[in-house]
Image (cartoon, rainbow, N blue to C red):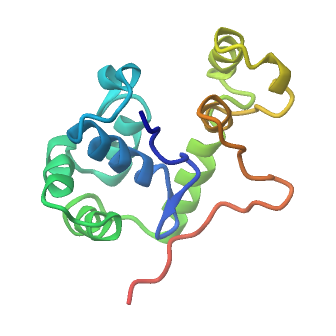
Amino acid sequence: MPYPCSPYQATQGLVYFARMLDKIRLHAAGQLPAEFHEFLGDGFDSRCLKFLGVDYEAVKARVAAGESDEQILGWCRAHGRAWEDDDVEIWNAFISKRGWRDEASERVAHRIKESGLERFDRQIATMFDYIDYDEGRTPPDFSKWVPPRLKAEA
């Protein structure tokens, strides 16, 4: 079964959003690995939804209607809470660094050990890093990676 896209993948500058939508699409198609099912709309999904100020079921309905990630994000912006580019920059910095020197650090360490990824423990600093390694991807090189900013709307 395919994994959802990387949490680092950005939609108009917003990280994680594409992964949440990918999970919804894969689940609807019966292709989402079972270990993801209980966390649909929870965890990072819930944090993203709170940031956007929208309801999971409403987003799920937009996905089911066949809208693109960009269209759904536009709908979220129109129907959720007001947010600016600086808010997105703060969101991206916060969510992409979960597990790095914060209260989630122990969870990342536990997941590394649980998944047998100890050989990568120096490369895995955040939950996003862990997710990418666990799903067979290599996270971005942070010496060159800058969290994307929200693209100006046309």
Give the x, y percent position of residue 66: 18, 62
Q: Kindly identify the residue that appears in the image at 50 percent across and 78 percent down.
A: 151
Image quarter of residue 124: top right
Quarter of the picture containing the C terminus is: bottom left
Quarter of the picture containing the N terminus is: top left
Q: Kindly identify the residue that appears in the image at 59 percent across and 33 percent down.
A: 135
Q: Nearer the viewer, residue 107 or 63?
A: 63
Please say if 103 is above or below 20: above
Please say if 12 is above or below 45: below
Q: Nearer the viewer, residue 93 or 27?
A: 27
- Residue 30 located left or right of residue 143: left
Which residue is farthest front? 1
- Residue 69 located left or right of residue 54: right
Q: Nearer the viewer, residue 118 or 70?
A: 118
Give the x, y percent position of residue 11: 45, 64
- Residue 141 located left or right of residue 68: right
- Residue 27 located left or right of residue 14: left
Q: Kindly identify the residue that appears in the image at 63 percent across and 38 percent down.
A: 132
Give the x, y percent position of residue 103: 63, 21
